[in-house]
Image (cartoon, rainbow, N blue to C red):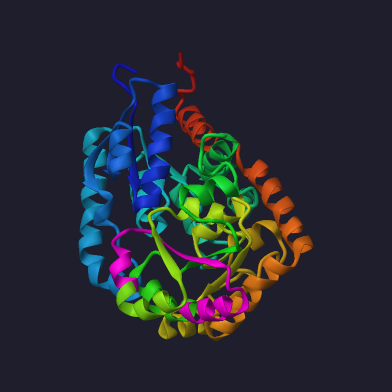
Amino acid sequence: MNRPLRLVLCAGEASGDMLGASLARALKARCPDIELAGIAGPAMSEAGVNAWHGVDELGVMGLGEVLSHLPRIYRLRQTLAAEALDHGADGFVGIDAPDFTIGLARHLKRRGMTTFQYVSPSVWAWRGYRVRRIARSLDMLLTLFPFEPALYQAHQLDARFVGHPLADELGAAMADPTSPLHDRQAAQAALGLSGSGPVIGLLPGSRLGEIERHAGILIEAAAILRKRHETAELVMLLAREGDRQTVESLIGPGLKENGVRLVCAQTRIGLRACQAAIAASGTVTLEAFLMECPLVVYYRLAPSTYWLARGLRLVRTRHVSLPNILEGRGLIPELLQHAATGQALADQAMRWIDTPSRREDYLHAARSCRERLALGAADRAAAAILERLGHAQDRRG
């Protein structure tokens, strides 16, 4: 090859930007002269990806919001496809955001480009009919969970489990004695918590709609927990500092009355500090599990979305939280829709506090899962991509 290898990477939100950054660093470590470009956020840009477009151009969630942005998103996909072809890219790597990246990959594959997807769509839980289309769109799928490659076997897609970057990152931090994630005491000290009573986390979710639906339920749970355990330290963990004003406008008096402290942009340290947490379903449940924080998982969908999903039978799994799916059992309680009441959430949280044998089972499962997933995902993904492109020589060092 007379020129450097060229890859187009496409991430769709902040979490994908972090995944893309670690992948970019691993690719450059193995192939220093590789050229990386595409849809990138700050982390990917810092890792050496030329940002043709920012991840914020794809950052829309919710059925109504997505529908209103469809024309713009379609134009962006057409633009990126043309840019990738004009650039003479050797491959395309979609990073999560499957509703955008899979269609783009299919378009590029038809034009002779080698296509990859880093992170499998959750076909095991939601809209399983996508498997065939995904298989036709990709040359290789890099999965984060060990059970995922088998889902594509019947469609002859080269799907490889590479491990989970979150397990790599958290495992390293927890092993570092200087890190606030090293143990519960270190995390509590980092947040200025006394640890004189149980620390219980309250997580409403990271999106505005989730905060609006869940804040009231959590303050009901907080009131019950405060009555049962006067020395408990209650912390509401918010993804961003910008969420503080939203939460205070919704439940400000309840926060003050029940002694709930808001902790912003320090979710991981907060989870590590907690003896139990009540968390909205999402990736944060895997973070909590890998950091050995006992969980109660809940969620309330917008009523229209819930009834649509139920009526069309779009949800396939018995469990909704990643810890339960990975363990294949109901390790943690899941309370959905009308079952997610303040009383029920508080009751389940106190069961973790009051039942040492239950906590020990959880901690053993969490440690075992972290070991299974912490395999060096970014480096394994980079090696697989370069191997597929016939550029497998490792030139690190």
Q: How many marks?
A: 0
Q: Residue 158 versus residue 13: which sits nearer the camera?
A: 13
Determine the image quadrant of residue 163. Answer: top right
Q: Residue 49 versus residue 142: which sits nearer the camera?
A: 49
Q: Could you tell whether 184 is left or right of 86 in the image?
A: right
Q: Residue 126 versus residue 187: which sits nearer the camera?
A: 187
Which residue shows up at 39% across the image and 46% down it?
94
**Residue 277 locus on image (x, y percent):** 56, 64
Q: Residue furthest right?
A: 357
Name the quadrant of the N terminus.
Answer: top left
Q: Is residue 165 above or below residue 234?
A: above
Which residue shows up at 36% across the image and 67% down it?
207
Q: Is residue 26 visible?
A: yes
Q: Is residue 217 above or below residue 181?
A: below
Q: Is residue 106 visible?
A: no
Q: Could you tell whether 273 is left or right of 262 in the image?
A: right
Q: Is residue 178 above or below residue 274?
A: above
Give yes or no for residue 236 being in the magenta stretch.
yes
Q: Could you tell whether 53 is left or right of 133 in the image?
A: left
Determine the image quadrant of residue 260. Answer: bottom left
Q: Could you tell whether 128 is left or right of 116 in the image?
A: right
What range is drawn magenta here?
219-247
